[in-house]
Image (cartoon, rainbow, N blue to C red):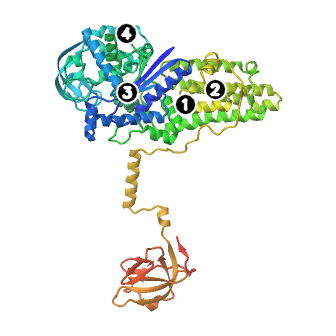
Amino acid sequence: MKKYITTPIYYVNDVPHIGHAYTTIIADTMARLYRLQGHDTFFLTGTDEHGQKIEEAAKQRGFEPKKYTDEVSAKFKNLWDSFDISYDRFIRTTDEDHKLIVQNVFSKMYEKGDIYKGEYEGFYCVSCESFFPQNQLIDGEYCPDCGKPTRILKEESYFFKLSKYENELLKWYKDDERCILPKSKKNEIVNFVKNGLKDLSITRTSFGWGIKLPANLNEPKHVMYVWLDALINYISALGYTNGDEKMGYWDSAVHLVGKDILRFHAIYWPAFLMSLGLELPKSVAAHGWWTRDGVKMSKSIGNVIDPKEVADAYGLEQFRYFLLREVPFGQDGDFSQKAFISRINSELCNDLGNLLNRIVGMSKKYSDYEIDSKDVFNFYKDEIDSANSLCKSALESIDEFATSKYLEEIWKILNLANASIAKYEPWNLIKEGKSDEANALVAMVSNLLAKVAILLSPAMPKSAEKIADVLNFKIETSSYKKLVENGDIMSFKSKDTSPLFERVEAPLLKDKVAKKEEDKKVQEEEKTQIIKIDEFKKIIIKVGTILECENIEGSDKLLKFQIDLGEEKPRQIISGIAKYYKPEDLVGKQVCVLANLKPAKIFKHLSEGMILSADDGKLTLLSTLNKVENGAIVG
Ligand code: ME8
């Protein structure tokens, strides 16, 4: 069977962040699962590069739009490559084939009578590249989606007859149970459409950075509305009207999107497809939004999460696991390092990593790494049956994109495996001479682990592969069919391994907010002149005996000392204490000297340190209570 999965194409007005990574990692997980199941899969991602927002972002940075989009688009592509995202095409809306197909689509709709010319006046949000009726604006002025100020635009425009498709859309929502996922999101869309759809303005004349209209229309002032241009990527990538080379995938299309752009995908896009006479997507699946420590991410707060930074700090596999596991699909989620670390330590290290180590250890001890499954069904049929039904429910969950529920079900298999070891105590079985039972237990748990590794492989490919390597089997369609679909078991030969995951003791990332706080603390400490012990340790104070002391000619403040600091030769030190002491009273006395002060010339005399004194209006030299060895360190 063919499978087609897409992510949104991301705007290049900014660099990739955790939200983009989330969508892309879910889509990648789905694509890997489809391939594992044996489906002929096409996975599409890319960048959305036209429109006023991009034109303005380029201008602000002093670039031509194309040069700017080349640069930012490459950042997305490089990030996905470094994350080993298994896309089949990375499409750019500036690709020549895409531009041609957008024009073809426009012509088709025009010829069908679904596009007409008119004039548009309305409130436009550049950030969302979207018009809003005034009654939807916040305080009559601000965008209801992003809260930024809107602009009034009045321009000649071509319109798409969206209103014509109102009933057909409502019928689709009603007839096709899975058209919008999670199903709870469908009502919002149905209500929006029931409130009445206005025709959609699909060209702009107020800026130039967009795809031109088909040449035969002779409209050089107009460029395509960026959302028409962008949505068409889903069929242009398959060669629609341009050889149709991959259109075979189209009937299985699933669009994965964030909740912010569900309206575009569940209303405009199917209406465009209806106009073209194409099949509608199998599902538009909308996930929720990520916040950080409960706060919306924004550049001005400085709490935007760079996915590369997180993956570098914690590991890509751990990052994938956390994103997929932390939030139920469709709900908003919060990225907190505390929650992340807790999942790594308890779920990845304890539940999974330790289990693998224990099984290898037991198989080594009981059966010289041979894990023979011949007796598993005799002794542990119930456990295998339970694991098989958990595999089924995991697959039912992922069918609705519920990645969190999917992993939860997989972890139930791990819990069953861990609980079985505790329950049957194989070490006692061995002692009691029941080695068949003990070996069957190790084999049963190994089979549970193998089923887990196969199911986990789309989400955590590298870790799953390592488990399979340790148990000496391959994760591929045939093992998926055998162990997961058919609920069968197999025998293994294990080998020694290093821990799958490392424990994390403290947060590994400092965001700009935390950094700011830390800088503030340092500044405050500097103000109160608090120093750290390390800073104090840099100061070397020694006790020494004054060997000689004399006045300096021409100065009534300075005295010149020769002091024995227990070094090869005495140090010469110049000190401004002539007002308080007579030279002859000081000879033979022990004083404290700052010994690692940079030498300086004072009144033409070299001074190689500083004699310490207490200042309460007059200076009193510091000494020790008892006589000590010259060179003794004060600290
Ligand atoms: O909307 N949490 O592009 P975009 C979760 N070009 N997901 C988030 C997120 C967050 N905080 N922030 C962004 C566009 N996303 C259009 C799409 S498609 C034909 C055109 C994810 O760069 C989420 O998937 O603004 C959202 O839908 C997408 O990034 C928007 O990316």
Q: Is mark 3 within 8 Å of ligand 1?
A: yes
* Separation (CA) of disc 1 from disc 3: 24 Å
Report the residue marked by disc 4: 172
Q: Secondary structure under badge 1?
A: loop
Of badges 4 and 3, nearer the viewer stands 3
Residue 30, image x and y in percent?
49, 23
What is the count of numbered marks?
A: 4
Marked residue nearer the N-terminal end (1 or 3): 3
Name the residue tied to disc 2. 474
Q: How far apart are marks 1 and 4 (CA)?
A: 36 Å
Vertically, is 274 above or below 609?
Answer: above
Mark 2 or mark 4, earlier in chain: 4
Q: Residue visible at 60% across and 31% down?
A: 465
The reply, left or right, for residue 11 in relation to residue 624 is: left
> Which quadrant of the render holds ligand 1?
top left
Frontmost of labels 1 and 4 is 1
Amino acid type assigned to the residue bearing label 1 in the image: Met
Q: Which type of secondary structure does the marked residue at label 4 adopt?
A: helix
Any part of residue 16 in sight:
no
Which residue in the structure is indicated by mark 1? 460
The label nearer to you, 1 versus 3, is 3
Of pointers 3 and 2, the one earlier in the residue sequence: 3
Please indicate, yes or no, whether residue 24 appears anywhere in the rendered image. yes
Pointer 4 or 3: first along the chain: 3
Task: Of the two numbered discs 1 and 4 on the same chain, state the one appearing first in sequence.
Answer: 4
- Tell me the kind of residue under disc 2: Lys
Q: Name the residue under label 3.
A: 9
Other residues around mark 3 within 10 Å, as few (<14) / some (14–19) / many (≥20): many
Q: Where is residue 111 in the image (x, y as percent from the top left)?
A: 25, 10
Q: What's the residue type where badge 4 is placed?
A: Trp
Q: Is residue 612 above or below residue 92?
A: below
